[in-house]
Amino acid sequence: MSPSPNRTASDVVSFGPDMLTLRGGLVLATKNLYFIGTAGSGKSTLTSTFGQWLKNESYDCIIVNLDPGCDSLPYEPDVDVRDWIRISEIMDEYSLGPNGAQILAADMLALNIGEVADVIEGFDTDYVLVDTPGQLELFAFRQSSRTVMDALGTNASMLAFLLDPVLVRNPNGLVTSLLLSVTVQFRIPLPMLSILAKADLLSEMEADAVSAWSRDPQALWAALCDESIDAQTQISLELLQAIDTVGAAMEVCLVSSETGEGLADIYSAVQHSLEGGEDIDR
Ligand SMILES: Nc1nc2c(ncn2[C@@H]2O[C@H](COP(=O)(O)OP(=O)(O)O)[C@@H](O)[C@H]2O)c(=O)[nH]1
Ligand SMILES: [Mg+2]
């Protein structure tokens, strides 16, 4: 990990467990970026490729695997929850099937998170990239994940929510995906970046359309009305209005781990949200 930037103690105005405020207002903190999304949405792959991108750009990062059920990973984790908890062992010990074991594992993780947090704190790094369990509901909808995020520090934390490219390529599917993203935003009160993962699977025309719809609710509204108005479209229109009314963030960032598209945009969005646009020292 790289040495800390060349500043002295007199620069420090205030500090906390995961935050250091310097004169001039620049906040230096280890940033936690949680990759969340439905099973197979590309979380582990993107955690890996974004980590590699950061390293290529001379930023420090570590990767934390919080999925106790994964068999293999596309990266070498710096901290691996499987050192504490393994789904196969929980299934044997408690005579549970894979789903029951996942739920118990999520709660056991919360009980052990102090130890995991201590290991993470041992790293002097700018970014902690957290790869979350395969199934979205295990992380987004269980109280135990709040305990986990509290232990890892929420001051400089952000969610990267991955949307499924197959679902978003038509207006009804995009509204369904946005609804899921809004639900997660309400469950986890952290800044969120919505990412359209595997963007390479969309044609240029589809990608442009999704991008335009996500930036402009009226354009999405018009696209919905262009489709045959059936019961699903009616519901989508109502849901879109609700999403717009509550002011939830709708814009999606197109990213591909395959081509590298959008990786720099993730970095910019994190900087913008957590540092007010200030670039940290490399
Ligand atoms: N075409 C394409 N496939 C991807 C991309 N990212 C991930 N995948 C594939 O999607 C599948 C699921 O990815 P994974 O990272 O394991 O998803 P997770 O369950 O959300 O962690 C794997 O077969 C990946 O190779 C991408 O950007 N483009
Ligand atoms: Mg995974």
Image (cartoon, helix red, strand yellow):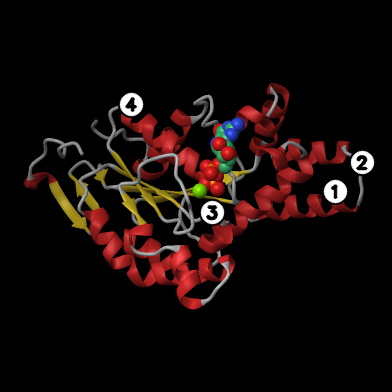
Residue at the top extreme of this rendering: 204
Q: Depth-wise, is mark 2 or mark 4 nearer the camera?
A: 4
Ranked by sequence position, the earlier of labels 2 and 3 is: 3
Q: Residue at x 29, y 33 (%)?
A: 59
Q: Find ligand 1 in the image and state its quadrant.
A: top right
Q: Residue at x 16, y 51 (%)?
A: 13
Contact flag, marks 1 and 4 (Cβ < 8 Å)? no
Q: Amino acid at mark 4?
A: Asn
Which residue carries the number 2 mark? Answer: 228
Q: Residue at x 61, y 52 (%)?
A: 181
Q: Residue at x 27, y 37 (%)?
A: 60
Classify residue 153 by image quadrant.
bottom left
Q: Position of residue 234 (x, y in %)?
A: 86, 52
Q: Which mark is residue 134?
A: 3
Q: CA distance from mark 2 to mark 3?
A: 35 Å
- Disc 3 under 8 Å from ligand 1? The reply is yes
Q: CA distance from mark 2 to mark 4?
A: 47 Å
Q: Position of residue 272 (x, y in %)?
A: 41, 38
Contact flag, marks 2 and 1 (Cβ < 8 Å)? yes
Residue at the bottom extreme of this rendering: 94
Give 150 or 202, whichever is nearer the viewer: 202
Q: CA distance from mark 2 to mark 1?
A: 8 Å
Classify residue 56 by image quadrant.
top left
Which residue carries the number 1 mark? Answer: 233
Which residue carries the number 4 mark? Answer: 56
